[in-house]
């Protein structure tokens, strides 16, 4: 099993039972089951919001997803991490939210982030981005 930091969008695909793209849903589910998963508190909160607002999950069902992910590694960031993410966002001209994902991965000792939100294959400092719907670097 290989380790990766999971951005919110990959987990949302896995949770979308009425997905317009069942191939992506199935791949996302496969990755969650076959990788060592790391997320951050940011990802957990974003996931809860998307499950409730966009996918129509009941509060308890959305909470269940958070509880399941809580069994994996969850990165907890500090104010110093936020400042570093802001600097990363400026350096790479990306959103501060995406930079915070990169910081959480780095702080967790991971060099790979699964996401659709950044450039596939690009290195952002010590962290490489992988869009597994294009190519899974851990396959």
Image: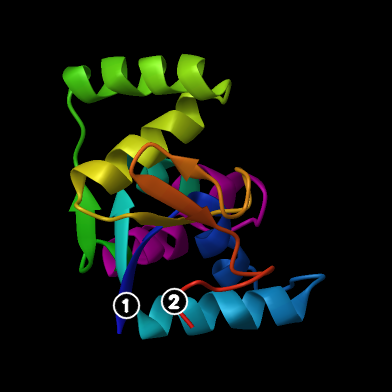
- Write down the region rendered in magenta: 48-68
Q: Residue furthest right?
A: 20
Is there a contact, CB below 8 Å, between mark 2 and mark 1?
A: yes
**Residue at image mark 1:** 2
Where residue 38 sits, quadrant-wise, is bottom left
Does residue 125 belong to the magenta stretch? no
Q: Which numbered circle lies on residue 138? A: 2
Tell which of 62 and 35 is nearer to you.
35
Q: Which numbered circle lies on residue 122? A: none
The image position of residue 42, as x and y in percent, is 36, 39
Write the residue at 56% across / 69% down. 15
Tell which of 57 and 85 is nearer to you.
85
Count of picture labels: 2
| Secondary element at tag 2 | loop
Magenta stretch: helix, strand or loop mostly: helix
Residue 61 horizontal side relative to residue 42, left or right: right
């Amino acid at each position: 099993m290989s380790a990766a930091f999971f951005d919110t969008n990959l987990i949302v695909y896995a949770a979308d039972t009425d997905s317009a793209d069942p191939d992506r849903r199935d791949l996302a589910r496969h990755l969650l089951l076959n990788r060592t998963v790391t997320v951050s508190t940011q990802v957990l909160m974003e996931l809860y919001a998307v499950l409730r607002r966009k996918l129509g999950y009941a509060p308890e069902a959305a909470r269940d997803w958070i509880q399941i992910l809580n069994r994996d590694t969850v990165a907890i960031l500090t104010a110093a991490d936020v400042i570093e993410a802001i600097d990363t966002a400026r350096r790479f001209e990306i959103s501060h939210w995406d930079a915070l994902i990169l910081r959480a991965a780095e702080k967790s000792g991971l060099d790979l982030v699964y996401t659709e939100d950044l450039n596939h294959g690009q290195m952002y400092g010590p962290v490489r981005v992988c869009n597994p719907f294009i190519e899974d670097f851990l396959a």
